[in-house]
C-alpha cells in the first residue's frame, strides 16, 4: 500500500476479519483493504501526506456485505452531510421537496466514505427512514422497489428475525423496520418466500418475557420499552397480535409511568420523550389509551418546547428536530397537539433543512443526515404542512 501519497504501513497478524482504511482530511477513503490475517498501522506521521492531514483506521468487523459483489446492489447509507441545516434565511418557510428527494437518492453513492462502513449496523433502519421520508414527500418512486425488497429479504435470519444487514444477527429493531418497509411498499407477501409472516411473528413472540410482559431486543436479553413498542407495532401490521400476552405487555407499560406523567425505558427510569412515544404508541395499539393521565402527560410534553420553537427530549436539554416527531406524535395520540406552538415548531423544523443540498440536521448549523430528515418531515406532516402525505402518529 505504500506510495508517494501514502505513509509506509507496518503489519501485525490477526485471525479475525478486519477492514483497514486510509482516510484523508475530508473523511474520504483513500484506500481500504479487507483481510482475515492482517491489521495495518502507519509507521510514519501524518505530515508525510501531501496536502491534507490523514490517518489510518483499522477495526475488527465481519467482512461488510457491501464489499461482496453478490447480493442486492442497492443499499442506504447513513453518512452525514455534506450540507448543514440553517443555510437559508432565518424566516425560511419553504420546504425544498426536490432537494430532499435528491439528497435521499444520493445516499447510495457515498460508499467511499468511512461513515458508510461504520454505520452498517443501521443499514436496514436507514432504508426505512429514507423510504418513509420519500413517501411523505409524495415521491415513493424515488427508490427502486424490487431492489428494496431484495435487500430486506437478504437481511432475514434463519430464526425469522432480521438483522441490520446481511450476515448480522437478528434484532427486534431491525425486524420492525423490515416489516414497516414491506408494508409501506405493499410487499408483505414477499415474506412467503422465506417462511411467511408466521415465522417473523414467532421470532418476535419468542422475545417476550413471560414473567414481566416486556420484550428483549434479541437473544442476549436487553430490555427496553422501545422493543415492547416495536413488537406490538410489527405484530399489529402482520395481524399477529394474538401471538403474545398483550395484557402483560400493557401492565408493564403502566409500571413505567412516572409521577411527572412521562415514561422511561423500564420501571423507575427517568422520563424521556422517546420512551414516552414508545409507551403511548404501545397503549394506542393495544387500545388502552384510557390508562394515560392525558393532562399530566400533555403538560410534561408541552414543556419540552423551547423559546426557539424546537422540542427537547427531557428538561434542560437542547432542542433537536427528531423530537418534532417523538413529542408531537405523543401529543397527537393523546389529543393535546394544540398545547404547543405549532407555527414556531414548524418554523424551527424548516430552519434545520439544507436548502441547497437537501436533508435535515438536528438543529441549524449542524450536518444533515437521513435520521433527522425523516423525523423533520414527519413532524411537518403531523403539523399539517401543505403538500405532504398525512402520517399516522402511532
Image (tube, helix red, strand yellow):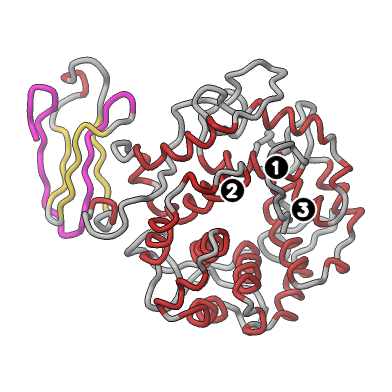
231 and 304: which is toward the camera: 231
Report if residue 124 lies within the magenta region. no
Quadrant placement of the N terminus: top left
Q: Left or right: where does residue 314 sit relative to residue 14?
A: right
Secondary element type, mark 1: helix
Which of the two marks, 3 or 2, is nearer to us in this view? 2
List x then y, in percent, for residue 126: 48, 50
Q: Left or right: where does residue 166 sit relative to residue 164?
A: left
Residue that mark 2 sits on: 135
Q: Left or right: where does residue 362 sit relative to residue 111?
A: right
For the point 28% across and 60% down, the residue is 71
Check if mark 3's residue and mark 1's residue have beta carbons within 8 Å.
no
Residue 278 figure quarter: bottom right
Residue 330 marker: 3
Residue 258 figure quarter: bottom right
Residue 88 figure quarter: top right
Above/below status of 212 relative to 166:
below
Magenta stretch bounds = 1-26
Report if residue 18 lies within the magenta region. yes
C-alpha distance separating marks 3 and 2: 21 Å
Q: Left or right: where does residue 285 sit relative to residue 103?
A: right
For the point 12% across and 47% down, the residue is 12
C-alpha distance separating marks 1 and 2: 14 Å
For the point 40% across and 76% down, the residue is 193
Which of the two marks, 3 or 1, is nearer to us in this view? 1
List x then y, in percent, for residue 306: 78, 32
Secondary element type, mark 2: helix
Query: Nearer the N terminus, badge 3 or badge 2?
Result: 2
Residue that mark 1 sits on: 379
Amino acid at each position: 500500500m505504500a506510495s508517494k501519497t501514502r505513509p509506509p504501513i507496518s503489519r501485525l497478524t490477526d485471525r479475525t476479519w478486519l477492514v483497514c482504511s486510509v482516510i484523508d482530511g475530508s473523511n474520504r477513503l483513500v484506500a481500504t483493504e479487507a483481510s482475515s490475517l492482517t491489521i495495518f498501522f502507519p509507521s510514519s506521521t501524518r505530515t508525510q501526506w501531501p496536502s491534507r492531514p490523514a490517518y489510518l483506521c483499522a477495526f475488527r468487523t465481519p467482512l461488510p456485505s457491501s464489499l461482496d459483489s453478490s447480493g442486492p446492489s442497492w443499499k442506504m447509507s447513513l453518512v452525514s452531510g455534506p450540507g448543514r441545516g440553517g443555510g437559508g434565511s432565518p424566516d425560511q418557510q419553504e420546504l425544498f421537496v426536490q432537494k430532499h428527494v435528491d439528497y435521499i437518492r444520493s445516499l447510495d453513492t457515498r460508499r467511499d466514505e468511512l461513515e458508510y462502513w461504520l454505520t452498517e449496523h443501521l443499514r436496514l433502519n436507514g432504508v426505512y427512514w429514507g423510504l418513509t421520508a420519500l413517501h411523505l414527500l409524495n415521491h415513493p418512486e424515488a427508490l427502486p422497489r424490487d431492489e428494496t425488497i431484495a435487500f430486506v429479504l437478504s437481511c432475514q435470519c434463519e430464526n425469522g428475525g432480521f438483522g441490520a444487514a446481511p450476515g448480522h444477527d437478528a434484532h427486534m429493531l431491525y425486524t420492525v423496520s423490515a416489516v414497516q418497509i414491506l408494508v409501506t411498499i405493499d410487499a408483505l407477501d414477499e415474506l412467503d418466500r422465506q417462511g411467511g409472516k408466521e415465522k417473523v411473528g414467532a421470532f418476535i413472540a419468542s422475545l417476550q418475557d413471560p414473567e414481566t410482559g416486556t420484550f428483549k431486543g434479541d437473544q442476549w436479553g436487553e430490555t427496553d420499552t422501545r422493543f415492547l413498542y416495536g413488537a406490538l407495532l410489527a405484530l399489529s401490521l402482520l395481524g399477529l397480535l394474538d401471538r403474545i400476552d398483550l395484557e402483560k405487555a400493557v401492565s408493564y407499560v403502566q409500571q413505567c409511568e412516572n409521577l411527572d406523567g412521562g415514561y422511561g425505558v423500564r420501571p423507575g427510569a427517568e422520563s424521556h420523550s422517546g420512551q414516552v412515544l414508545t409507551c403511548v404508541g404501545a397503549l394506542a395499539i393495544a387500545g388502552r389509551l384510557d390508562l394515560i393521565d392525558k393532562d399530566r402527560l400533555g403538560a410534561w410534553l408541552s414543556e419540552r418546547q423551547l423559546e426557539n420553537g424546537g422540542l427537547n427530549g427531557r428538561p434542560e436539554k437542547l432542542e433537536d428536530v427528531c423530537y418534532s416527531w417523538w413529542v408531537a406524535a405523543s401529543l397527537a395520540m393523546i389529543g393535546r397537539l394544540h398545547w404547543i406552538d405549532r407555527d414556531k415548531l414548524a418554523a424551527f423544523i424548516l430552519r434545520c433543512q439544507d436548502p441547497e443540498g437537501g436533508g435535515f440536521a438536528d438543529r441549524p448549523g449542524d450536518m444533515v443526515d437521513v435520521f433527522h430528515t425523516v423525523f423533520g418531515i414527519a413532524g411537518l406532516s403531523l403539523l399539517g404542512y401543505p403538500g405532504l402525505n398525512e402520517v399516522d402518529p402511532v
